[in-house]
Image (cartoon, rainbow, N blue to C red):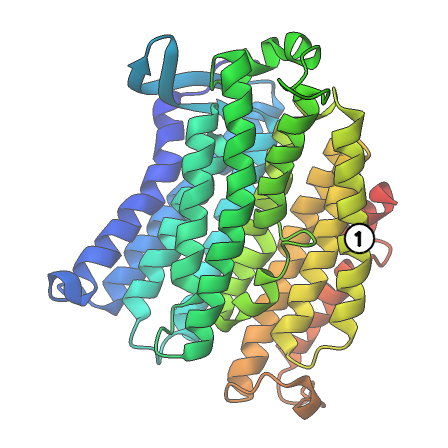
């Protein structure tokens, strides 16, 4: 039965991880005198993400039956005719992203209990990853550019906190600063694109902007003979290049491996780096009106897919190898977007999220087993000592290279 989704239930999805993050971050750290211990911190954050996942899964089932939701929950302010609102748009794309984000986040939360057990920043770490989940959910569920931009910047901020989690290491401080600054370059293009669309469509709501897309497609940028829609789409895509680490804004991603491994799995596999892919898929009605913008997307994606694969071959750090592989796969997704195959790009996004998170978590287990040595030249014959990790890493690798009967085969084959 096709019907409306319950907005109050949808509101619980981002707010449950936020509540868990607030409890662990305020009462579990020195901020309020560490009132709750480790067990309470991880229990409350895992519970928040679990609730979010269960509601997301239920939402996906309803959406597959034809239910949708597009509505405003709260009007923040009105400036003349411009309304700044918080609202949700839940369709098949959003519901799929909600399930991916919450499920991978749940797995990472559970994995972190063992991975970070010797770390004094345990509670702070749980607070950060829950906050990250909240920011990512706000991004994918938004129905307007204002909320999209809030989520976009919030995931950037939390990734900065996570990459520099071990803030006493000079390399970690350098890496998180680099990630933050490179993302700012992309975000500058992103906000210009939003500004252009706002100036000519007079609204920040997706549906209202898309309704005026035919009118915007006839306009040129004042003072030039460039098509306005092309400039706006390329500006939006520059934002995606920063977040999704496309050439030449890819330089932050390999360095971001300085953060703890659960973060690499969360940020660089399933959630943050796919925000750009999600955004371009969401803006597909606009991109379809500009062949130039699509060609630009296609070329950038192809360069990234090719060269990051080459760079991955010569790395010695186990996490960097997987990071370059992520860059290459993001290039594949971008190529699919440039070829107007949005559903294929999003399908690969989903399959990649699961097997890449698996590979990162497997790499984390190996790093712990090797007493924090990340050099693959010192590894070998670990099958005897870590048979389960060996099996999981093998399955993840087979999916990644596109072996028939694995998920990666289906999505990569569709792109090719």
Q: In this view, does 133 lie to the left or right of 27?
A: right
**Residue ID at (22%, 53%):** 23
Residue 55: x and y in percent read 44, 35
Q: Is residue 106 visible?
A: yes
Which quarter of the picture shows residue 54? Answer: top left
Q: In this view, does 307 lie to the left or right of 187?
A: right
Residue 94 versus residue 271 in the image, above or below: above
Residue 255: x and y in percent read 56, 69
Q: Quick one: quadrant of the N terminus?
A: top right
- Viewer-proximal residue, 168 or 87? 168
Residue 415 versus residue 179 in the image, above or below: above
Residue found farthest to the front = 223
Q: Is mark 1 on a helix, strand or loop?
A: helix
Residue 384 versus residue 112 in the image, above or below: below
Q: Residues within 10 Å of mark 1 (few under 14, many from 20)?
A: some
- Viewer-proximal residue, 319 or 248? 248
**Residue ID at (64%, 12%):** 216
Q: Is residue 110 visible?
A: no
- Give the total number of marks visible in the rendering: 1
**Residue ID at (81%, 44%):** 299
Q: In this view, does 192 lie to the left or right of 80?
A: right
Q: Quick one: quadrant of the C terminus?
A: top right
Instruction: Determine which residue is flagged by label 1.
Output: 303
Q: In this view, does 77 lie to the left or right of 384?
A: left
Residue 33 versus residue 155 in the image, above or below: below
Residue 219: x and y in percent read 67, 12
**Residue ID at (36%, 76%):** 117
Residue 345: x and y in percent read 73, 40
């Amino acid at each position: 039965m096709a019907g409306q989704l319950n907005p109050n239930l949808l509101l619980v999805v981002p707010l449950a991880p936020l509540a868990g993050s607030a409890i662990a971050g305020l009462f579990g750290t020195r901020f309020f005198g560490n009132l709750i211990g480790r067990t309470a911190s991880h229990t409350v954050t895992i519970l928040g993400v679990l609730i979010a996942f269960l509601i997301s899964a239920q939402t996906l089932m309803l959406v597959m039956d034809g239910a949708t939701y597009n509505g405003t929950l709260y009007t923040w302010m009105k400036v003349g005719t411009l309304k700044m609102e918080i609202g949700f748009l839940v369709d098949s794309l959003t519901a799929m992203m909600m399930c991916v984000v919450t499920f991978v986040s749940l797995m990472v939360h559970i994995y972190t209990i063992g991975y970070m057990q010797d770390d004094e920043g345990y509670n702070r770490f749980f607070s950060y990853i829950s906050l990250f989940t909240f920011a990512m959910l706000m991004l994918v569920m938004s129905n307007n550019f204002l909320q999209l931009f809030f989520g976009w910047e919030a995931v950037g901020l939390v990734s900065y906190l996570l990459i520099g989690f071990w803030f006493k290491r000079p390399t970690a401080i350098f890496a998180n600063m680099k990630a933050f600054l490179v993302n700012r370059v992309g975000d500058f293009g992103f906000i210009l694109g939003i500004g252009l669309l706002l100036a000519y469509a007079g609204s920040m709501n997706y549906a209202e902007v898309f309704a005026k897309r035919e009118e915007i497609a006839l306009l040129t940028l004042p003072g030039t003979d460039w098509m306005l829609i092309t400039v706006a789409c390329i500006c939006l895509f520059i934002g995606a290049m920063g977040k999704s680490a496309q050439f030449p804004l890819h330089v932050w991603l390999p360095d971001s491996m300085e953060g703890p491994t659960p973060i690499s799995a969360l940020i660089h596999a399933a959630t943050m780096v796919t925000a750009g892919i999600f955004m371009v898929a969401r803006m597909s009605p606009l991109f379809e009106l500009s062949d130039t913008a699509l060609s630009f997307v296609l070329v950038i994606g192809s360069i990234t897919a090719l060269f990051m694969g080459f760079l991955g071959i010569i790395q010695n750090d186990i996490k960097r190898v997987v990071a370059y592989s992520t860059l290459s796969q993001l290039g594949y997704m971008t190529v699919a977007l440039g070829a107007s195959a949005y559903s294929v790009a999003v399908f690969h996004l989903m399959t990649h999220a699961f097997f890449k998170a698996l590979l990162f978590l497997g790499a984390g287990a190996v790093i712990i087993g090797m007493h924090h040595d990340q050099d693959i030249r010192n590894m070998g014959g670990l099958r005897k000592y870590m048979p389960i990790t060996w099996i999981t890493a093998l399955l993840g690798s087979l999916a990644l290279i596109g072996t028939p009967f694995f998920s990666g085969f289906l999505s990569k084959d569709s792109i090719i």
